Amino acid sequence: MTKVLVVDDDFMVAKLHSRYVSQAEGFTVAGVAHSGGEALRAAERLRPDLVLLDIYLPDMDGITVLRELRAAEERDPDRPSADALFITAARDAAVVRSALRAGALHYLIKPFNQAALHEQLRHVAALRSRLDRLDEARQEDVDQIFGTRPPGSRELPKGLAPHTAELVERILREHPGDLSASECAAAGSLSRVSARRYLEYFAETGRAEVTLRYGGTGRPERRYRRIG
């Protein structure tokens, strides 16, 4: 289970976010804090895997909290590092830039619904899982962790074409929910075999997740959903 510390000065909002987190598979609420100082003390005590941080806190802003958290982790080499996801109404581009430079994984602007938060939590889980499995990183691993390179710059395996990869990735991005290789093939005027090759490539490189849908008979259907 991924332990989450929820930080928001509004008690009702913190309660709502906690409920969203508790309903996400693989996540549990380790604690709740309503100020920056309380958040730092809770992080020291609870050692969460992920901190959901608001920018606007009564004693210090969330970016300062994250910087203090990183400094505390550097002082204690045995202390595990916590990831951070900002959840805030702050829309100023300079604030977003500061959050990124402070080491946030992502930045979710209020108001949002449960599905939006769950999508970000799945993204966090996928990144953590990917890092845990790695001994040596390939370029596609680094691209997934730090963000994709510009279109056309990614090296594809032999037999896969950049323009078709972009098409399949766009279908994944624009399709609501998950889809099968047959549905992807129909949307892109591709063969089912070709669509599945690209979908499996995206799954292998961490840009899509695969779930199985079981029917009455035969093999379960593989369903693909874009990550991030």
Image (cartoon, rainbow, N blue to C red):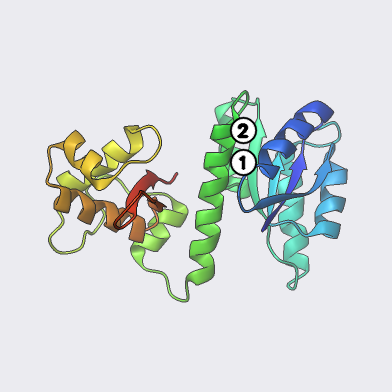
Q: Callout 2: helix, strand or loop?
A: helix
Q: Nearer the viewer, residue 175 or 213?
A: 213
Q: Which residue is mark 2?
A: 95
> Which kind of residue does numbered mark 2 sit on?
Val
Task: State left or right for residue 2 relative to residue 60.
Answer: left
Task: State left or right for residue 15 relative to residue 132.
Answer: right
Q: Quadrant of residue 94?
A: top right
Decide: few, some or many residues near mark 1? Use Cα within 10 Å; few <14, some 14-19, many ≥20.
Answer: many
Residue 77 vs 185, above or below: the answer is below
Mark 1 and mark 2 in contact? Answer it, CB < 8 Å: yes
The x and y percentages for residue 93 are 55, 29
Visible in this render: residue 212? yes
The x and y percentages for residue 195 are 19, 48
* Res 99 label: 1
The x and y percentages for residue 99 are 61, 41
Q: Callout 1: helix, strand or loop?
A: helix
Decide: few, some or many residues near mark 2? Use Cα within 10 Å; few <14, some 14-19, many ≥20.
Answer: few
> Which kind of residue does numbered mark 1 sit on?
Ala
Which residue is outermost to the front?
A: 216
Q: CA distance from mark 1 to mark 2?
A: 6 Å
The x and y percentages for residue 54 are 72, 35
